[in-house]
Structures are given as C-alpha cells and as structure tokens.
Image: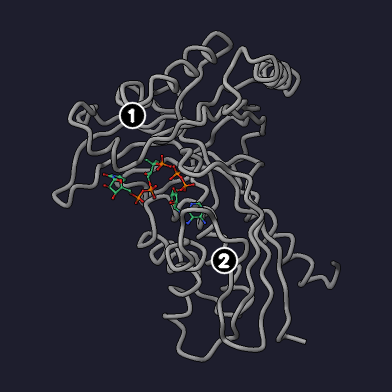
Amino acid sequence: MTGHAALTLPAPAKLNRMLHIVGKRPDGYHELQTLFQFLDHGDTLHFRLRDDDAITLSPQIEGVSHADNLIVRAAHLLKGVVDRPVPGVEITLDKKLPMGGGLGGGSSNAATTLLALDHLWQLGLGTDHMATLGLTLGADVPVFVRGFSAWGEGVGERLIPAPLKTPWFVVVHPGASVSTAGVFGHPQLTRDTPLISMSRALQGGHNDCEAVVRRLEPEIGEVIDLLRKYGPAMLTGTGACVFCPFESETSALELEREILYGIARHAYPDRWSVFRARGCNISPLHQALNKLRVSSDTGVS
Ligand SMILES: C[C@@](CO)(OP(=O)(O)O)[C@H](O)COP(=O)(O)OP(=O)(O)OC[C@H]1O[C@@H](n2ccc(N)nc2=O)[C@H](O)[C@@H]1O
Ligand SMILES: Nc1ncnc2c1ncn2[C@@H]1O[C@H](COP(=O)(O)OP(=O)(O)O)[C@@H](O)[C@H]1O
C-alpha cells in the first residue's frame, strides 16, 4: 500500500580533514578550501507516508522549533518544487550527533530528508537539483546530498571527489559549543590563507578556525592539545568536536577507553563525550540507497 510506504536511512557525520579560509565574499560568507569525509556514525531517520498531507517530526529537538528544524524545512522545500500533490510524511529522528559540533548533523539530516522524500514521492529530481536546493538550507548540505568524500571550494558547494585514506577516528565533544556565525564573524579570524591544490591539501592542512575557537572556548583547545599527544588531532569545521585519526581500530579503541575512563574517574569533565568511527569515502546514506536500488532491481530485499 503506497500510502504507508516506509524507509529508514542514516544521516552520517562529516569531518573537515582540513579547513582553510581563503577569502570573504561581498555577502559576508567566507570562501573555503576543505576536505570533507564521512563517518560511519550518525543519526537515523525513519520516514512513513501518511494518508493526509501533514509533515510531522518526533521527537522535537530541544531549542529548535518544528518550523526551524532542518528536517522539516527540507521536507517543505522539496514539497514546494513538486507540481503534483504528494502525501504527508511521518518522520522519526534518532539523534546521536551532538548539535553544533562541527559534525554537520543538521545538514546531514536535511540531506537525508531530501533524498528519502525524492525516493518515497518518486520524484526523480536528480542529485544536482537536490544539491542546489540543499544549499539554500546550509552550506554543508550539498556534500551530504552528493555523498562522496570531497575537496570543497566556494562555501563548500563546489565539490570534486577526493581520494582520502579511511582511518579510524576518535572524536571528542567537549560539551562546550561555539556558534558558526560567531567564529566566522570574529575579528581575529584568519581569512587570507593562500589557495592550494587538492593534491597539496591531501598531504596535510590545518583548520583556520582553531585559533579563534581556542580564544572563544579554551576547553576546546585543551581537548586539541590532549589528543595531539596521540596523533595529528584537528578541530572539525568551526568545532566544537575534535578528531584524531588512527590506522587501526584497536588504537582508536584504546584512546576511546582511556578518555571514557578519565571521564568516569573525573580526570576529565563529565560533560565530555567520545566515540570512535571509521572514515568512509561513500556516505553511509548513499551506501544504503544503493542497496535499496539493487534490491528493487533484483527483487531481493
Ligand atoms: C564551517 C563548516 C565547514 O564544513 O562547518 P560547521 O562547523 O558549521 O559544521 C560549514 O561550512 C558551515 O556550514 P553551515 O553550518 O551549513 O553554515 P550556515 O548555516 O550556512 O552558516 C552559518 C553562518 O556562518 C557564517 N558562514 C558560514 C559558512 C561560510 N562559508 N561562511 C560564513 O561566513 C555566516 O554568517 C552564516 O550565517
Ligand atoms: N535536525 C537538526 N539537527 C541538528 N541541528 C539542527 C537541526 N535542525 C536545525 N538545527 C540547528 O542547526 C544548528 C547546527 O547544527 P549541526 O549541523 O548539528 O552543527 P554544525 O553545523 O556545527 O555541524 C543547531 O545548533 C540547531 O540550532
């Protein structure tokens, strides 16, 4: 019964493996050069078509109104470009990603909603169209719509596939939060890092937001310093999360356990949280959608 077709899809996290700020546009947005990579860790969204035309979301996110939620905004945005009536949808969010953590959770939720409803409403809009629509919701939405690890330029909307290594990561959220607008609006932000090529960036880069984030939230700097004892740790996006890459899951697990142990015996603040995840060059969302296409082509589910 199409009226109750349902779909469950992941909304993964992203990391900015480096983030250079190379200029400022007349509209105030900053021009970036960044390497985006996905993690096999994130939120999960469940979609079920309804008999009426309502778009519902549960549970609500504390501090974000229904209308402002990027999931609801993405659903309405898509509905607005369709020239025929579409059924409503009941959406359930299983939130794992910290908000405002630089992991792109909100943008990822929006991208998953666009792709899920394109599928359930049988729109066939195409990736380019959905990436363009997604950019109106947030600078990070296009990379989640496209679903490949990428070298991003502009505000992150000019994307080309980037062949990144796929290490394991330990990701620490220090509890503190920093606003993206606050970092980009900071007078001391470096905005003139020279342009580099993707191949140069693949050999290593830095995050231009780090100095300002350290000033705004010194505790985030403490987490960066702590993780740098174990590897080339870096801030993702405008923070607050800090990640450290490892070649093996075992090494990542050791550090994850050490931090969990430190939190348990109050060596580190109990507002910190930590997880480990594997980097992936094809987004878990796209891996799931590809499986869905294969099973509907072959009749295997
Ligand atoms: C910096 C990045 C890097 O991946 O990550 P996050 O730390 O936010 O995850 C993103 O580009 C963030 O994208 P997103 O979180 O979607 O930002 P938006 O909501 O579009 O922008 C929030 C505000 O930040 C400022 N902003 C954002 C992006 C940018 N390239 N230049 C800016 O100056 C603008 O003032 C904007 O109003
Ligand atoms: N579905 C959503 N999930 C997370 N944040 C959302 C969502 N909808 C709106 N937001 C807003 O977007 C902001 C940025 O969230 P998020 O994408 O998680 O962080 P970041 O941009 O730092 O990676 C949040 O602080 C919140 O106010």
Residue type at mark 2: give it.
Leu
Pick the front one: 263 or 80: 263
- Read off the residue under disc 1: 209
| 27 displayed left or right of 266 | left
Vertical relation: 233 (above or below) 178: above
Residue for point 43% across, 69% down: 129
Q: Are the two marked residues, 1 and 2, in contact with CB atoms closer than 8 angstroms?
A: no
Would you call the spot at circle 1 few (<14 residues within 10 Å), some (14-19), or many (20 or more)?
many
Q: Name the quadrant of the C terminus.
A: bottom right
Residue 203 position in % (x across, y down): 45, 22
Quadrant of residue 3 in the image? bottom right
CA–CA distance in space, label 1 to label 2: 31 Å
Residue 289 position in % (x across, y down): 67, 61
Q: Which of the labelled discs sits on residue 92, or is there none?
A: none
Residue type at mark 1: give it.
Cys
The outermost residue toward the right is 300
Residue 214 position in % (x across, y down): 35, 21
| 91 displayed left or right of 191 | right
Q: Is mark 1 on a helix, strand or loop?
A: loop
Which quadrant of the figure shows ligand 1?
top left
- Read off the residue under disc 2: 115
Quick one: label 1 or label 2, which is nearer the N terminus? 2
- 1 vs 2, front mark: 1
